[in-house]
Amino acid sequence: MARIEIPDGDENEIIRMWGVNPDMGMVGATFSAKVYEKSALAVRERELVRMRIAQINQCLT
């Protein structure tokens, strides 16, 4: 569950969040694609980094 206010709706939470500002959604999608397609890190290392970032941000899900 997001810790920010997003519009109500039937779509996935992520879709509703980026729907608030679609231009930012495209920037986020491009950034994400580069991280996954052009990363110098191995998949396991990248996922470990993601887990640590989530832990630091107290992300429970």
Image (spheres, grey):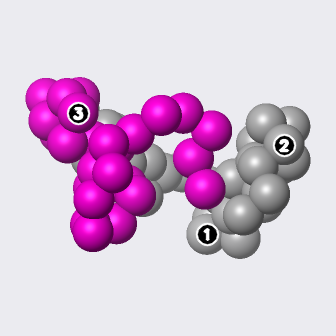
Is 2 a magenta residue? yes
Callout in the foreground (3, 1): 3
When asked about the image quadrant of residue 46, the answer is: bottom right
Closer-to-camera residue (52/2):
2
When asked about the image quadrant of residue 58, the answer is: top right
Q: Residue flagged by tag 2: what amino acid is it? A: Gln
Residue 30 in view of the camera: no
Residue 54 spot, x, y in % from top left: 76, 48
Instruction: Say above or below: 44 vs 19.
Output: below
Label drawn at residue 20: 3
Which quadrant of the figure contains the C terminus?
Answer: bottom right
Helix, strand or loop for disc 3: loop
In the rendered image, which residue does mark 2 sit on? 58
Instruction: Say above or below: 29 vs 3.
Output: below
Question: In percent of the image, x 76 and y 49: which residue is there?
Answer: 59
Instruction: Say above or below: 17 vs 36.
Output: above
At label 3, counting other C-alpha atoms closer than 10 Å, the crowd grade (few under 14, some 14-19, many 20 or more) is few
Question: In percent of the image, x 71 and y 70: which residue is there?
Answer: 44
Question: In percent of the image, x 26 and y 66: which residue is there?
Answer: 11
Closer-to-camera residue (60/9):
9
Residue 53 in view of the camera: yes
Is 32 a magenta residue? no
